[in-house]
Amino acid sequence: MINDTDNLEAFEAKETVNKLPVSWLILFWGLILWGIYYFVSYTPSISGWSQEKAYEESIRK
């Protein structure tokens, strides 16, 4: 007896027909953009920001 799961190509074709909701795509790309921003903003060799500098600036105020 042959069922749908025996034919892997047909099974994959049925599963890939569904599209992701637009909100999931917006969230996905938004998280990628946020990650790039965060990496650039808080990497000391790129932005020059460091916790020590931030602490010293807060003490001077």
Image (cartoon, rainbow, N blue to C red):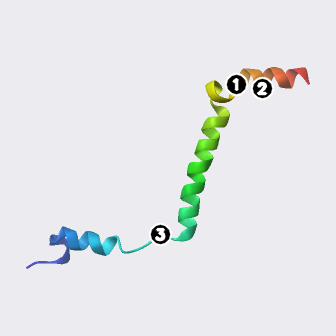
Kindly indicate the quadrant of the structure image that contains residue 5. Answer: bottom left
Quick one: 17 or 60, which is closer to the camera?
A: 17
Amino acid on which the number 1 mark rests in the picture: Ser
Amino acid on which the number 3 mark rests in the picture: Leu
Sooner in the amino-acid sequence: mark 1 or mark 3: 3
**Disc 3 packing (10 Å; few <14; some 14–19; many ≥20):** few
Label 2 secondary element = helix
Q: Position of residue 39 (x, y in %)?
A: 60, 37
Amino acid on which the number 2 mark rests in the picture: Ala
Q: Distance between the residues labelled 3 and 2?
A: 42 Å
In the rendered image, which quarter contains the C terminus?
Answer: top right
Residue beneath the point at 54% across and 64% down: 24
Quick one: 43 or 54, which is closer to the camera?
A: 43
* Picture layout, residue 39 above or below residue 21: above
- Which residue is the site of mark 1? 50
* Picture layout, residue 25 above or below residue 11: above
Q: How far apart are marks 1 and 3 (CA)?
A: 39 Å
Q: Distance between the residues labelled 2 and 1?
A: 6 Å
Q: State yes or no: discs 2 and 1 in contact (Cβ < 8 Å).
A: yes
**Disc 1 packing (10 Å; few <14; some 14–19; many ≥20):** few
Q: State yes or no: discs 3 and 2 in contact (Cβ < 8 Å).
A: no
